[in-house]
């Protein structure tokens, strides 16, 4: 730890102004869509509210369910509430803090992995302007924390690896595994890297890494198994298709590539080149742990046919950038005119990200928030004011609805109602029209989404009879929503 602290003090002394400017840039850019808050943020808030009220880790009071992805984020949100912050605002402040911390730590990480100070500084500025990191910075989800923990794990691991003594690597890897379940993959990859690079000390170092990580992760797994009868979150199971066909694998790989290349096409191309040269010389082996993380996390998503979004890939995007800039650095130095090519490379990366941020991300976040403010929030308020306190509501978008209405919710997606997961191949409309939700409960009201106004006014006569109560028009709410309109209808059920 002394060596790490000494290294960070040196960074502050020599490049503190660079870190400060990068952090300021990131903060200003995040402010462009500070208002963006996802429905999933309200899901965490609902769990935190029930946890603090003494109802356990439950979405509906008294019903324990593993309907959240990050236990660490849930506990941090609850902690912010105990400090006097509103749950939603507290989560956004946490996200902003972790974003700025990740921006600050990028330079120390880059200087460990790269050879030239100028390259590391350019990478730090490029990361401060990364569109995907900025998009999720203040939405209230765990993504910024995940990025910070990945970068911190890299910094601590390489510092201790160079010193030949591991004290804190296992601790940070254990904490990371509580941030998102897929980050548990970091531990075996670190152990493989230790075995490959320090074989004469591998056994003793294994235990110095494994034991601290196990002391952090195993108690949570034991509690999760006891409380939920599973150590895997419902969110992970519900979003994994487990379709092992070649077509599904290609589709998943294509989507992952498209998300990464949208903001980091040059780094992705250079990273592929790095992979091709991986076994050719010792320079490549120096970053073996990083490239293995970049390879195996997407393979995990592809193998499970997981529903992948940009925020899931932010665990590897900064690592792809580090590898890409490392390859660029080696090529540019050989070709001479290093500073000229560094300027061109940096300007291109930043320009690509700013185009995506201002022309794609910010317009979508505005549409999303309009939909939340004009539809989901009014629906939740209407239900709170016009339904009995003990009413149960079946719905697809459950976060805002549960947090504001204080009603029991049956989750049609199955994230907090596991009994609905067996219908994951059915459309949301089919779950409502054919009463598939009856296998999970007997709700008093159901909310359905429709692509046309005519469909939204349909009333199904077969038991239980549906009575149309209210109808809303709303822009599409999903992550890739393009502003097309859909319709939400509330039905009352009569058994």
Image (cartoon, rainbow, N blue to C red):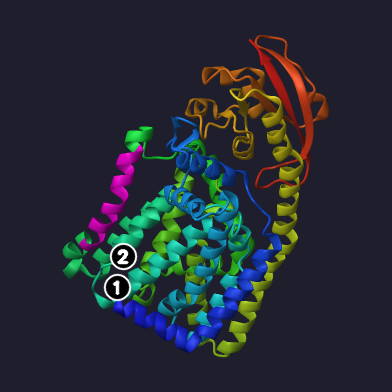
Q: Taken as a whole, is the magenta stretch helix, strand or loop? A: helix
The answer to whether residue 227 is seen in the rendering is: yes
Q: Quadrant of residue 494?
A: top right
Q: Which residue is mark 2?
A: 169
| Image quarter (top left, top right, bottom left or bottom right) of the N terminus | bottom left
Q: Is residue 15 magenta?
A: no
Q: Which mark is residue 160?
A: 1
Residue 340: x and y in percent read 62, 87
Is 145 in front, or is 235?
145
Is disc 2 placed on a helix, strand or loop?
A: helix
Q: Is residue 223 magenta?
A: yes
Judge whether 388 appears above or below 378 on screen: above
In the image, which residues are magenta? 208-224
Q: Residue at x 47, y 66 (%)?
A: 319
Whichever of labels 2 and 1 marks the residue nearer the N terminus, that label is 1
Q: Is residue 36 left or right of residue 412?
A: right
Q: Residue at x 31, y 65 (%)?
A: 169
The answer to whether residue 411 is seen in the rendering is: no
Is 77 in front, or is 277?
77
Residue 246: x and y in percent read 51, 41
- Mark 2, Cα crowd under 10 Å, few <14 / some 14-19 / many 20+, is many
Is disc 1 placed on a helix, strand or loop?
A: helix
Q: Are marks 2 and 1 in contact (CB under 8 Å)?
A: yes
Residue 217: x and y in percent read 32, 50
Q: Residue at x 59, y 71 (%)?
A: 128
Q: Quadrant of residue 26?
A: bottom right
Is 86 in front, or is 368?
86
Judge whether 126 appears above or below 248 on screen: below
Judge whether 154 appears above or below 43 on screen: below
Q: Residue at x 41, y 60 (%)?
A: 293
């Amino acid at each position: 730890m002394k060596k790490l602290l000494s290294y960070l003090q040196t960074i502050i002394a020599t490049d503190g102004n660079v870190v400060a400017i990068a952090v300021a840039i990131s903060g200003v850019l995040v402010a462009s869509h500070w208002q963006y808050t996802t429905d999933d943020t309200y899901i965490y808030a609902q769990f935190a509210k029930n946890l603090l009220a003494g109802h356990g880790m439950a979405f509906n009071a008294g019903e324990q369910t593993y309907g959240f992805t990050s236990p660490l984020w849930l506990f941090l949100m609850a902690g912010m509430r105990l400090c006097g912050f509103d749950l939603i605002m507290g989560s956004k402040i946490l996200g902003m803090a972790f974003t700025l911390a990740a921006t600050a730590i990028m330079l120390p990480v880059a200087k460990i992995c790269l050879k030239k100070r100028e390259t590391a500084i350019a990478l730090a500025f490029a990361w401060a302007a990364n569109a995907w990191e900025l998009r999720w910075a203040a939405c209230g989800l765990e993504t910024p924390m995940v990025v910070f923990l990945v970068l911190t794990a890299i910094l601590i691991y390489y510092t201790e690896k160079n010193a030949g003594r591991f004290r804190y690597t296992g601790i940070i890897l254990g904490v990371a595994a509580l941030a998102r379940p897929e980050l548990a993959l970091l531990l075996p990859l670190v152990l493989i890297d230790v075995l490959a690079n320090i074989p004469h000390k591998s056994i003793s170092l294994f235990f110095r890494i494994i034991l601290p990580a196990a002391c952090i992760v195993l108690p949570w797994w034991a509690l999760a198994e006891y409380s939920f009868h599973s150590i895997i979150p419902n969110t992970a199971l519900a979003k994994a298709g487990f379709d092992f066909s070649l077509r599904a694998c290609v589709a998943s790989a294509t989507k992952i590539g498209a998300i990464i290349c949208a903001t980091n096409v040059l780094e992705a191309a250079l990273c592929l080149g790095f992979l091709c040269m991986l076994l050719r010389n010792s320079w490549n082996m120096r970053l073996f742990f990083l490239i293995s993380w970049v390879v195996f996390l997407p393979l995990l998503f592809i193998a499970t046919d997981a529903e992948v979004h940009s925020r899931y890939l932010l665990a590897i995007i900064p690592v792809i950038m580090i590898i890409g800039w490392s390859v660029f650095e080696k090529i540019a130095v050989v070709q001479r005119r290093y500073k000229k090519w560094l300027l061109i490379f940096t300007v291109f990366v930043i320009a690509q990200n700013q185009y995506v941020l201002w022309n794609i991300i910010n317009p979508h976040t505005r549409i999303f928030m309009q939909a939340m403010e004009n539809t989901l929030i009014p629906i939740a308020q209407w239900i709170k004011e016009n339904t009995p306190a003990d009413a149960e509501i079946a719905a697809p978008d459950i976060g805002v609805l549960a947090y504001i209405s204080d009603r029991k919710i049956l989750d049609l997606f199955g994230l907090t109602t596991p009994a609905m997961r067996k219908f994951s191949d059915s459309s949301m409309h089919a779950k409502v029209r054919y009463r598939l939700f009856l296998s999970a409960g007997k709700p008093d009201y159901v909310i359905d989404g429709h692509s046309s106004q005519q469909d939204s006014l349909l009333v199904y006569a077969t038991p239980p009879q549906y009575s149309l109560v209210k109808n809303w028009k709303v822009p599409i709410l999903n992550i890739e929503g393009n502003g097309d309109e859909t319709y939400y209808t509330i039905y009352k059920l009569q058994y």
